[in-house]
Amino acid sequence: MSSAKVPIVKIWDPELKLACDMNVNNTLALENTRMVRTYVGIDKRVRPLAMIIKHWTRRRIVNDAAFGGTLSSYTWICLIIAFLQQREPPVVPALHQHPAKLIKKNGARSEFADDLDPLKGIGAKNKESLAVLLFQFFRFYAHEFEYDKYVLSIRLGKLLTKTEKKWHIHVNNMLCIEEPFNTMRNLGNTADDTSFRGLHMELRRAFDLIADGKLDECCEQFVFPKEEERIWQKPAPHQDLS
């Protein structure tokens, strides 16, 4: 897809039913992947929480930044990490601020903490179960987070105001998520105002269903309405019966 921020080729294997995105010379993606892998390794709750939420995003079709105007899989992972950083006490730290940074092969120090040994167990003071974290994730993004005011920064492990970032005047800025390596980029700007309202409705729907213990219904496959169903209550042509 040449119109993407990073040109990609989308690949689909119909036999294995696997999708894959391929790009060339995008070294930043390697750092993103390494950072996510480090976050996942810090606490045993991170991976299953991410897998459940990613499953939900696929089923509800809110994980397509390129064609669907929603959010990429990487953006959802950043939302999960930001949420875990906001817990009291936090489940994961801000790796970019932590000192446990290894030396790369080229002699440079890593941009983020990637030495897992001192990082493991850092969230042990947080006793919330996986189920509680899942419930609180949807509660946070459905009802608690002030989208009109704040930017999520996993680089700093805290919220910034849109005014601080000078993102208060940008377009498509209802959802603001700072990319941790390219801090001028808003990962949430793939969703315009209309898409954001749809995303927020899905988050609220998920919260309500999980609150009722209906996880299966929460992850029910979204089906686009048929054309004839979308054209509902279409006025009949005017007939002169005089």
Image (cartoon, rainbow, N blue to C red):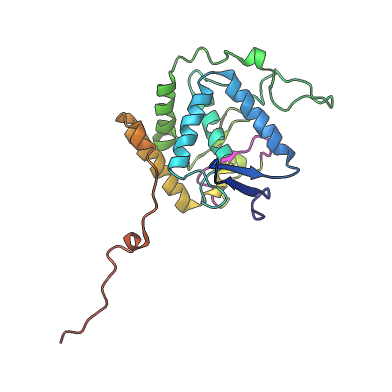
Please tell me whether residue 161 belongs to the stretch shown in magenta: no
Judging depth in this view, the residue of 23 and 147 nearest the camera is 23
Query: What residue is rendered at 55% in x and 33% in y?
Result: 77
Residue 68 position, x and y percent, is 51, 51
Residue depicted at x 49% and y 25%:
48
Residue at x-position 64% and y-position 51%: 4
Query: From this viewpoint, which residue is outermost toward the front?
Result: 15
Instruction: Name the outermost residue toward the left.
Output: 242
Is residue 180 found inside the magenta-colored segment of the image? yes
Q: Nearer the viewer, residue 132 or 9?
A: 9
Q: Nearer the viewer, residue 48 or 175?
A: 48
Image coords of residue 215 (percent x, y): 36, 31
Q: Position of residue 60 (x, y in %)?
A: 43, 43
- Which of the 4 quarters of the picture holds residue 152? top right
Q: Which residues are magenta?
A: 172-183
User: At which x and y percent is residue 232?
Assistant: 30, 62
Name the side, left or right, on which 48 lies relative to 122. left
Q: Is residue 146 visible?
A: no
Dividing the image into 4 quarters, which one contains the C terminus? bottom left
Residue 242 position (above or below residue 121)? below
Main secondary structure along the magenta-highlighted residues: loop
**Residue 219 occupies quadrant:** top left
